[in-house]
Image (tube, helix red, strand yellow):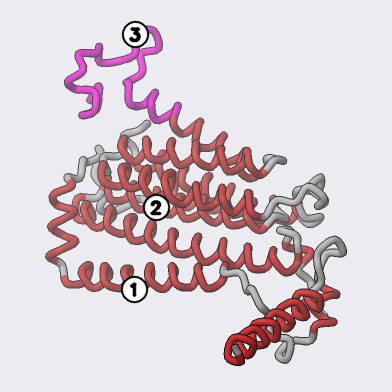
Amino acid sequence: MSHSLDAYLVLSALLFSIGTFGFLARRNAIAMLMSIELMLNAVNLAAIAFGAFTPSLQGHAALIALLVMAVAAAEATVGLAIVIAIYRNRRTPLVDEYSQMRE
Amino acid sequence: MAHGPLFADLGLPPTIPLLDWPWDDALFLILAGILLAAALFVVIGRNIVRSGLAMMACFGALAGIYALAGAVIVAATQVLVYIGAISILILFAIMLTQTKAGPSNLVFHRQAWAGALAAIGLGLLLIVSMINTQWPLAVADRLVSSTTSVAMLLFDDALYVFALQIVAVLLTAAVIGGVFLAKREHTPDPGDRDIVTLDRLRAPGEPSAASAASAASASPTSASSSTTAAEQA
């Protein structure tokens, strides 16, 4: 099972859909950011799986995964700073309370 | 191939004695189970601090799967960057934005069922299309990628060197942007903002912006009067 590409890809698809559900359904902004991290990890897992089973992609997949990790770190920094800045104004981390721009 | 390269020199029997499974298949199943269970707990857990801790477990299991797939440098970086940095950052953000008074009993939106349907549909679509595709370049068994080849590729290939520079600029911009966004504004300028609007946005227990602004405007006058007193002396 761990010697087939499909097992890794199915695991990555399951992780991505779990992250999608969390991003669509959670009310807490930080939980939404955590779901985004899960989705980025699923993409990384798919890249690593393709790199592990394709000889011409071997080093490239690891490099792409490392670059995705760096971008994820930057995204988490800015996203959490935005959440903290909004929390300072509105006193709530729940995204459906952020209705100021709707009016 | 009875057992993978990770288990070749451990002196273990080629399969698990009672179950007749290869060792790395069992390890893959255990890690995948931990990964999916922790990810589900991140998504549906009621307490967000426990969700953050489950996210760390999820990242750890994923690092194990990376090592099992032969990407050792990515597994190490996963532990360092995700478990060491991003999880801690998220846990600190959770601690900074928790409210006890807030309505935390409703975890999901009211339209969560639509999100669940969309996620299940997306997952089924991905799984069906992945299984039914014959990947043309894939080989039958997995390869172990050496860290040396990754490093040679990173610093020899002009494209990846350029990407490395771009990532450096991006991380610098993210640090500056994060500090700027999360910085607390100490003295709001009363001329620029409508203080009444700011007061309406605040919680009732908090000191209002008008009193803070008056205190801020009172302190420079006292300071200037003291300086004039010093000059007169």
Q: Position of residue A44 (x, y in %)?
A: 39, 52
Residue B26 drawn in magenta: yes
Say few, some or many: other residues with alpha carbon within 10 Å of mark 1 (under 14 / 14 to 19 / 20 or more).
few
Which segment is the magenta one?
B1-30
Q: Is residue B167 above or below residue B110?
A: below
* Residue located beneath label 2 in the image: A44
Task: Report if the CB atoms under discs 2 and 3 are less than 8 Å apart.
Answer: no
Q: With A43 as the anchor, is B231 left or right in this view?
A: right
Identity of the residue drawn at 73% across and 55% down: A27
Q: Residue B169 got which mark?
A: 1
Q: CA distance from mark 2 to mark 1?
A: 22 Å
Q: Position of residue B13 (x, y in %)?
A: 25, 11
Q: Which chain does tag 1 point to?
A: B
Which one is in front, B162 or B123?
A: B162
Tags 2 and 1 on a common chain: no
* Residue located beneath label 3 in the image: B17
> Could you tell me which secondary element the residue under label 1 belongs to?
helix
